[in-house]
Image (tube, rainbow, N blue to C red):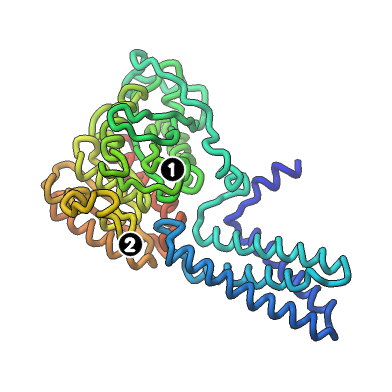
Amino acid sequence: MLVPTIWNIPLLSGVTLGVISGVAAALVIILVISERGNACSISRIAIGAGVGGLLLGIAAWLLGDVFHVFGDFSLSIPMIGWAIAGGAGVGSGIGTLTSKKKWRSCVAVLLILTSASAAGVGINQAVGYFVTPKQVIGMFSRPQYPQLPSFDLAKTVSLKVWNSTAHTVTDGRLYQVHIPGTVSGFETRPAIVYLPPAALGARPARLPLVVVFSGQPGWPSDVFDSGHLAEVADAYARIHNGVAPIIVAPDQLGSAGANPMCADSSLGRNATYLSHDVFSWIEGHLPVIHDADHTAIMGFSQGGTCTLQLGFSHPELAHTLVPISPELQPTIGSRTIAEAFGGNAAAYQANTPLYMLRIHGPYRGVAAAFYVGESDTKYRQWAASLSSAARHSGIEASLHLVPHAGHNWHTAAYALRTSFSFVVARLGLPQ
């Protein structure tokens, strides 16, 4: 069917971008050729292209790098370039809309649509966020997973006695569930839970746990939609008789654009929610092994910072950490201390990873694999500082550079995939 095919067009494919860009370029050529000999019309097309490219380029720079509408994500030169190119195409189309010939107006409308699409797809390819148009539409109707089934934890068994022939599914499944802020009072969106085949039978196995945080702005499902973590876990489970960690992606933000900084502050008792409410709920509702040796915490960007804050301040929860492009310290901008901590600088400092290392270290049995984009200059410096400080506090820390990548979901997806063997080995599963 045509509609399902459209919804599943691979937005990260170079072929997709090439086709859309090629159509837009062809439409520009058609308009220019059709207006040959008409200096006034050619001028309108040229002026429209110049004004449109300039305005959209400036708008992209302001939104991304001045007003930080996209949170931690700054717009790279290629992204601004796609904004300029798209704006030029849109401007060219607008400059031709007043043509007396209807067919030229129709071509102009198509040019506007294809140019805007090319800019969107080009920028998205630089970020690596949307995989298909279906995911774009899903932004307005999330979450999109079935409700998590309830477990009778009395019927769970250890992996040693679990029978691998008992499971009847070959891949894991994703579910949504609301994890209440029982103690913290923090209000959240539903969490997303990945259950491997070993957890889906009549007598599920007790399995290691991975808690993972998406970035900001974002959704808990981003680590599965854009980070492809379920596919990574499924690939592992297929060659290990259905066994893989249970993965929980809680909502550490509260809403897509919020940033409570994984701290207890005037923005909410976010740290208490994550360290107490989330882990207490998991232990009471999922067939997981309840100890730090069988628990890992992962996260990207703001979620990577949260990984460090939670892991450094509560080593009793997890002994394995994978911070991906973490910040040096949590922030909501220049008014962080005033807005979140009532001007109390000491209270703010107590929520920074470096402070937590000094207070809670030295550590024993904790390992952290830091990942950061090779071309992500600012975050690379931060990751180097944090990993060095972690090593000095007794943590077995390593730093991994993602080749030819910046601060985007290409880096996150690479890190989630590449670090999985490290995680499962640390959690006691075969590599």
Could you tell me the amino acid type at mark 1?
Answer: Ser
Q: Which mark is residue 102?
A: none
Q: Classify the position of the N terminus by image quarter.
A: top right
Q: Classify the position of the C terminus by image quarter.
A: top left
- Residue 251: percent from the left, percent from the top? 39, 39
Q: CA distance from mark 2 to mark 1?
A: 24 Å
Residue 88 vertical position relative to residue 194 in the rendered view, above or below:
below
Q: Residue furthest right?
A: 101
Taking the spot 46% from the left edge, 63% from the top edge, the residue there is 64
- Residue 388: percent from the left, percent from the top? 19, 59
Taking the spot 65% from the left edge, 60% from the top edge, the residue there is 117
Could you tell me the amino acid type at mark 2?
Answer: Tyr
Q: Which mark is residue 255?
A: 1
> At numbered mark 1, what does the secondary structure look like: helix, strand or loop?
loop
Instruction: Decide which of 194, 70 is in the foreground and name it.
Output: 70
> At numbered mark 2, what does the secondary structure look like: helix, strand or loop?
helix
Lower position in the chain sequence, tag 2 or tag 1:
1
Circle 2 residue? 379
